[in-house]
């Protein structure tokens, strides 16, 4: 950080202001700190420390209140240099792991089932808006492909990718196909492409299918369509959101105009997905499980709408694929708890999706 390092006394008072404000949602005064915390400091001394913190922009005085609230700068100093993160409560661990492992144990389960369950339990445990993004697929390993004839001129292509991930695309055909012709092409595609990443297939499919003696017209169509068939899924198809009911219940959003702004932002799912996927690398800290935790506070966010929000996010890993999970909430969120929940959730998602055969 560019600012000077705060003294121990200043760090204690700033930490107390933030932790108390998280709980009470009300400005914190020196008298409150003197009465509720055994710092060995007088009310007057605490008031002087708070005046110094306000002068340097770490806390501010809302309206005519005698108390102070944290600023974006104060929150940033807190999460970077004061906050300590312990492991998650065992009861919450059990709830998360049971929900996710149960959704992944069903033989008919898909990655969507697991990720939808993850979003729901993440929102419920964090009491914030939860966002789960399935992994980008360029590095995903292609397992097999199937084609289902919907009519004589329409076909659905189903790609099975490692760890329950499935991609489906409906194609319009300018030819009529029999089931036998389709099966021959499917067999060749699976023999020659299985085990490659989608990116490798896009780059080399023409060469890998050269000399194919099966249906030439259908094979050429697959080659021409490779950029779509073996491409990333659109970001909106990768997005799972839950917990709106928790975030709108926060005191910060009691005013009707604030609720409208929040709902408008949530409904713009593309922007929400971008906020979590492209959070800035310069704001990272490493959580206790080793994941990079990104915390983007207020005006640090790239979009204008969430300048009253904090976004906490972390990646999870499935083989060589990377997905993202995040929590969106008011700046007055319990940062330690958010980091603990995301760390454990990332571990559970990585484990559940990677263990699938």
Image (cartoon, rainbow, N blue to C red):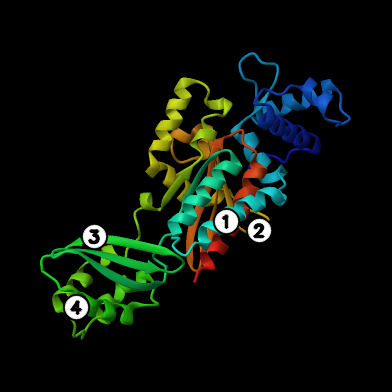
Distance in Å between CA atoms under marks 2 and 4: 51 Å
- Give the spatial CA distance, label 1 vs label 2: 9 Å
Q: Relative to residue 293, is residue 136 drawn left or right?
A: left
Mark number, residue 63: none
Residue farthest along the left direction in this orientation: 175
Residue carrying label 4? 180
Q: Where is residue 84 in the image (x, y as percent from the top left)?
A: 72, 47
**Mark 1 or 4, nearer chain start:** 4
**Nearest to viewer (mark 3 / mark 2):** 3
Percent position (x, y) of residue 349?
Answer: 55, 58
Q: Which of marks 2 and 4 is nearer the N terminus?
A: 4
Do tag 1 and tag 2 residues touch (Cβ < 8 Å)? yes
Q: Mark 3 points at which residue?
A: 170
Q: Is mark 2 on a helix, strand or loop?
A: loop
* Residue 19: quarter of image: top right
Report helix, strand or loop for mark 4.
helix
Q: Which residue in the rendered view is the most extreme toward the right?
A: 40
Q: Residue at x 49, y 56 (%)?
A: 114
Across and down, in percent, residue 294 comes to: 56, 49
Q: Residue at x 48, y 42 (%)?
A: 242
Instruction: Answer with left or right where residue 102 lies relative to residue 45.
Output: left
Real-space CA distance between mark 3 and mark 2, rounded to the nearest whole angstrom: 41 Å
Q: Reading the chain from its start, which is encountered first: label 3 or label 2?
A: 3
Question: Which-is-in-front pick, marks 1 and 4?
Answer: 4
Lower position in the chain sequence, tag 3 or tag 1: 3
Q: Name the residue under label 1.
A: 346
Q: Which residue lies furthest to the front in this view?
A: 107
168 over 272 or under it: above or below: below
Q: Label 3, secondary structure: give it.
A: strand
State the residue position of label 2. Answer: 289
Mark 1, Cα crowd under 10 Å, few <14 / some 14-19 / many 20+, is many
């Amino acid at each position: 950080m560019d600012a000077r390092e705060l003294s121990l006394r200043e760090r204690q008072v700033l930490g107390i202001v933030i932790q108390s404000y998280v709980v009470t949602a009300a400005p914190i005064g020196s008298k409150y700190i003197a009465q509720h915390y055994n710092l060995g400091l007088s009310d007057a001394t605490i008031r002087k420390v708070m005046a110094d913190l306000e002068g340097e922009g770490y806390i501010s005085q809302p309206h005519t209140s005698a108390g102070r609230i944290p600023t974006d700068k104060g929150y940033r100093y807190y999460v970077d240099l004061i906050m300590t993160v312990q492991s998650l409560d065992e009861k919450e661990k059990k709830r998360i792991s049971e929900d996710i492992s149960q959704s992944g144990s069903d033989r008919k389960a898909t990655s969507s089932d697991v990720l939808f369950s993850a979003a729901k339990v993440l929102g419920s445990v964090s009491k914030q808006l939860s966002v789960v993004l399935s992994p980008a697929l360029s590095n995903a390993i292609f397992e097999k492909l199937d084609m289902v004839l919907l009519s004589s001129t329409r076909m659905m292509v189903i790609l099975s990718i490692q760890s329950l991930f499935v991609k489906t695309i409906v194609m319009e055909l300018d030819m009529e196909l029999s089931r036998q012709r389709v099966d021959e092409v499917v067999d060749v595609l699976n023999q020659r492409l299985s085990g490659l990443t989608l990116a490798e297939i896009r780059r080399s499919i023409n060469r890998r299918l050269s000399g194919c003696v099966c249906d030439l017209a259908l094979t050429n169509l697959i080659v021409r369509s490779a950029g779509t068939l073996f491409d990333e899924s659109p970001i909106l198809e990768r997005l799972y959101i839950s917990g709106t009911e928790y975030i709108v219940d926060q005191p910060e959003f009691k005013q009707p105009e604030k609720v409208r702004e929040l709902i408008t932002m949530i409904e713009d799912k593309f922007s929400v997905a971008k906020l979590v996927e492209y959070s800035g690398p310069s704001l990272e800290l490493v959580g206790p499980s080793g994941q990079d935790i990104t915390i983007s506070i207020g005006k640090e966010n790239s979009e204008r709408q969430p300048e009253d929000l904090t976004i906490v996010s972390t990646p999870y890993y499935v083989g060589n694929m990377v997905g993202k999970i995040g929590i969106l909430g008011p700046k007055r969120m319990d940062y330690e708890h958010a980091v603990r929940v995301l760390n454990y959730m990332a571990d559970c998602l990585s484990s559940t999706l990677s263990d699938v055969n």
